[in-house]
């Protein structure tokens, strides 16, 4: 299948300059989900010829769900406003997914910056201890970077897409667990390449660590055994900015208390292997 089998969805907020640079690199249909920006993001999207969805408020990662629902292709690729897929990668991704009908998600190799250094998460996925099961086009994974993922649209929407509780920061794991619980496979396919050029300044690392700790704890509560939640809580308490994230998670618990739905034992065993258990 050609690139027309894949729609690229970009969720963004108040980063019109970065979006203008990256949209010029995309091929095939593109949907921009504007998470209630106050800058020129809508004009930039329209000028680039992308379809525009304006969210009523900042939905975070869940904004991508609006784009996937709007897409009229069988596959959806995600990109950040500072990333893009290498030419030909989405054609190849469509062909791989066509040939592997039980695979719901492919994770690409991510090259960062002008020097194109390998993203550490990509290196981790290349060594996934989950192996290469029959029927998968690459090593099995239970996590990914959203800007490097191509999904089977129907499978993504059937499990609910990205959580609106997690916002941004480690939101990928919950989706991966939900896809695995639904019987879908996910694979790292390094032949697919994404380029990511994040801004060198303006990123609050402490806030990112805090959000990451919060979301790891909430994900553990929602889908994992209480023993895994306890381990995450201990690790967060010892990590930089982790105690603040732990407090954030505790405050968010009432909103997700009834949404707890532990994954099947087989999925938890695979997830525990990633932690070395």
Image (spheres, rainbow, N blue to C red):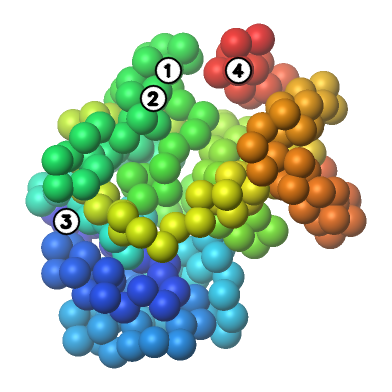
Tag on residue 128?
A: 1
- The residue lying at 36 percent from left, 59 percent from top is 201
Q: Which residue matches tag 4?
A: 275
Q: Are marks 3 and 1 in contact (CB under 8 Å)?
A: no
Q: Quadrant of residue 275?
A: top right
**Residue 76 appears left or right of 118:** right
Left or right of 132? Residue 229 is right
**Residue 172 in the image: above or below residue 36:** above
Crowd around label 3: few <14 · some 14–19 · many ≥20 (10 Å) = many
Label drawn at residue 125: 2
Q: Which disc number belongs to residue 3?
A: 3
Dot placed on the residue nearer the N-terminal end, 4 or 3: 3
Residue at 39% x, 31% y is: 121
Say if mark 2 contacts mark 1, CB within 8 Å: yes
Distance from the alpha carbon under mark 2 to that under mark 1:
5 Å
Q: Earlier in the sequence, mark 1 or mark 4?
A: 1
Rendering coords of residue 219 (x, y %): 69, 41
Task: For the residues labelled 2 and 4, say whether their Cβ atoms are less than 8 Å apart.
Answer: no
Q: Nearer the viewer, mark 4 or mark 3?
A: 4
Q: In terms of sequence position, does the residue under pointer 3 or pointer 1 come before the other?
A: 3
The local crowd at label 1, few if under 14, some if 14 to 19, many if 20 or more residues have their Cα within 10 Å, is some
SS at badge 1: loop
């Amino acid at each position: 299948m050609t690139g027309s089998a894949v729609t690229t969805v970009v969720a963004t907020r108040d980063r019109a300059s970065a979006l203008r640079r990256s949209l010029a690199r995309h091929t095939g249909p593109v949907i921009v989900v504007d998470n209630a920006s106050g800058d020129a993001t809508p004009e930039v999207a329209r000028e680039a010829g992308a379809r525009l969805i304006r969210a009523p408020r900042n939905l975070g990662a869940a904004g991508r769900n609006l784009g996937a629902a709007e897409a009229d292709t069988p596959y959806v690729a995600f990109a950040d406003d500072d990333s893009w897929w290498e030419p030909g990668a989405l054609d190849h991704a469509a062909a791989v997914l066509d040939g592997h009908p039980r695979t719901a998600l492919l994770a690409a190799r991510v090259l960062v910056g002008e020097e194109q250094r390998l993203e550490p998460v990509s290196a981790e996925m290349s060594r996934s201890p989950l192996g290469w099961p029959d029927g998968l086009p690459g090593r099995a994974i239970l996590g990914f970077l959203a800007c490097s993922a191509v999904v089977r649209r129907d499978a993504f929407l059937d499990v609910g897409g990205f959580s609106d509780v997690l916002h941004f920061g480690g939101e990928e794991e919950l989706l991966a667990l939900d896809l695995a619980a639904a019987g879908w496979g996910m694979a790292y396919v390094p032949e697919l390449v994404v380029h990511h050029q994040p801004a060198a300044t303006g990123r609050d690392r402490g806030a990112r660590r805090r959000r990451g700790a919060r979301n790891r704890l909430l994900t553990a509560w929602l889908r994992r055994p209480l023993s895994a939640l306890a381990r995450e809580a201990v690790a967060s308490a010892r990590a930089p900015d982790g105690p603040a994230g732990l407090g954030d998670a505790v405050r968010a618990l009432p909103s997700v208390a009834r949404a707890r739905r532990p994954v099947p034992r087989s999925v938890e065993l695979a997830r525990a292997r990633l932690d070395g258990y």
